[in-house]
Amino acid sequence: MPLLQRIWPHLALLLAMCFWSTSYLAMRVALTALDPHRLMLGRMAVATLVLVPLWPQLWQSLRRHGRWGWLIFMGLCEPGCYFLLETNALRFTTASQAGMVIALMPLFVGLLAWFSLRERVGVQGWCGFALAVGGVVWLTLAAAPQESAPNPLLGNILEGLAIFCGSLYTVTARHLSTSYSPLQITAVQSLVGLAFFGLLHLLVPLAVSPVRLAVEVPAWAPWAAVVYLGCVVSLGGYGLYNVGVHRLSAARAAAYTNLIPVMTLLFGVWLLKEVFLPAQYLASALIIAGVLLSQWRRQ
């Protein structure tokens, strides 16, 4: 097998993590002017509009394969419930902390993949995941409320629930990858997400306080963040991630999400001036150690 063909799934996942690591920052910026429902409705609308020229061909293929129940369930898990929980989480906690909580993803995916897809996860992998979970708990308990993060405990709990929904999505996408291409899966996600958040916006209007950041952002920044989230993060990130899930196992693809905490922490502290306490840096080191331990067996 040519070298590029072997490493392409890994490069795709790496680039997806780069996009996703900035999504937490972009959502925090967007939430300074928009409520969670409007933010996600705009994001899904942008992603769906970009794919309009491809829908006739995609529709024919989708009709040929069927499995609509699984496709809708996947879309409800993510972007539906995942982003509903995550956007609300980012009202209460910082982008840096939310990015660290995502280290729970491989634990949930490993458990679900073992249960539904019979993918094997060794004892050392589970020990590493448990260490990472301990680090996330420590990170959350060490957090102190601040103006830009008024309730980090609630925010991190909501982010943890979002990660569980994202894990259900990953396993379902892996199950569907035998019938659908990454582009088709991404297109269905965007359409289901548009319907989901459109109904929420109409039926459950929100009156929430805007997020306060430690830095000033221009008036156009929240809207630019929505376009960035819809085009680059939703389409580029999920398209590349689905390529990785299609070529690798669900657990191996999810393991790459552990790059997001480090990237998000660096960007959050650097660009948004978010505050991390010394104990939280130690908790972050514990999370990274757990990740390394869980992945060591695959080398």
Image (cartoon, grey):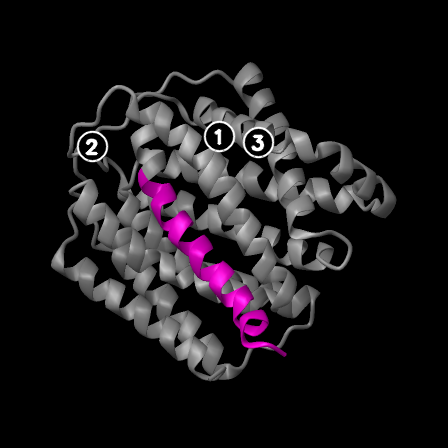
Q: Which label sits on residue 59?
A: none
Q: Counting other residues with Cα less than 10 Å from the Cα at mark 3, is it few (<14), some (14-19), or many (20 or more)?
A: few
Position of residue 235 measured from the top left corner of the image (x, y, whole percent): 53, 41
Amino acid type at circle 2 is Leu
- Foreground label between 1 and 3: 3
- Above or below, 186 against 290 in this view is above
Label 2 sits on residue: 213
In space, the residues marked 2 and 3 are separated at their CA atoms by 30 Å
Q: Give the labeled residue for mark 3.
A: 50
Q: Is residue 191 left or right of residue 225?
A: right
Residue neighbourhood size for the residue with mark 1, other residues' Cα within 10 Å, grouped as few (<14), some (14–19), many (≥20)? many
Closer to the observer: label 2 or label 3?
3
* Residue located at (65% from left, 39% from top): 187
Contact, mark 2 vs mark 3 (Cβ under 8 Å): no
List x then y, in percent, for residue 250.
60, 64
Label 2 sits on a secondary structure element that is loop
